[in-house]
Image (cartoon, rainbow, N blue to C red):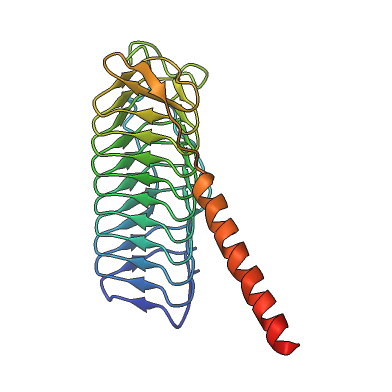
Amino acid sequence: MKNVSITAKIASTVIIYDDVVIEDNVIIHDYVVLYSGTVVHSNVEIFDHSVIGKIPKAPGNTSRKLNANYKKVIVGENSILCPGVVLYSGTEIGHHVLLGDNCSIREDCKIGNYCIISRNVSVNYETTIGDYTKIMDNSHITGNMTIGKHVFISVLVATTNDNSMGREEYSIDRVRGPIIEDYVTIGAAANILPGVKIGSNSIVAAGSVVTKDVPPNKLVMGVPARIISDVDWKPMNKLINKLWFFGIIIWWLGATMFEQKN
């Protein structure tokens, strides 16, 4: 059974399977497919040829076994899915998220709020991406990977999760993607190898190959990447300065009103 709001605007060419929920003021353009178990929250817009709730399939030639059942795929309110987006089952998209043209997000992923996943980005299975993170065009985010909040990943970045490069059978204990902590910046065409941890507020220069852990607040560069310098920029400084500035304004306005009243 479908649960579709009367305020939703849905093109006549859209295919909606049973067990789909579409909330208020959703706009769905031509040739979108919504599979069972899809929940689209209010004020979402889904553009042409997107596929939501796709169930992963394999012809028996993959070492990683697929689940028999998956959770619902959820699209958070006020998000935009551009043409050709594919979301697999069990994936959760936060609110105010922009998914670019032909972006693909595999099963059981979680994308935070206010994220941008740009054109032709592929996000593999069981990966988590934190709030306010931006991933630019044509980058690949591997499976079993964790990305923190306020991370910026530039174009053509590659991440991997298997040091055996497929020579050994899949094991979740061995096949692990990188861990990228909060406020990390990764330059264009960088390559982040399996299991590497990049500490918070660090910067990976363009074209670098990161083969080992990077401590917090470091700039790394080269092949393989080496520590070049410290990163002095503190992510909270701007926020603290803004709060201090607005605090002074509020105090001044309050003092002025008090003087005028008396």
| Towards the viewer: 109 or 130 | 130
Picture quadrant where residue 223 is located: top left
- Seen at 28% across and 70% down, the residue is 29
Q: Is residue 161 visible?
A: no
Relative to residue 166, is residue 93 depicted above or below?
below
Q: Is residue 192 visible?
A: yes
Relative to residue 27, is residue 197 depicted above or below?
above
Q: Position of residue 22 (x, y in %)?
A: 46, 70
- Seen at 23% across and 40% down, the residue is 138
Relative to residue 163, is residue 56 depicted above or below?
below
The quarter of the picture where the C terminus appears is bottom right
- Residue with the most extreme bottom position: 261
- Residue with the most extreme right position: 262
| Towards the viewer: 142 or 236 | 236
Picture quadrant where residue 56 is located: top left
Q: Position of residue 261 (x, y in %)?
A: 73, 88
Q: Position of residue 127 (x, y in %)?
A: 46, 37
Numbered label tally? 0
Picture quadrant where residue 33 is located: bottom left
- Seen at 32% across and 51% down, the residue is 86
Relative to residue 9, is residue 20 drawn left or right?
A: right
| Towards the viewer: 258 or 39 | 258
Q: Position of residue 188 (x, y in %)?
A: 25, 34
- Seen at 50% across and 32% down, the residue is 200
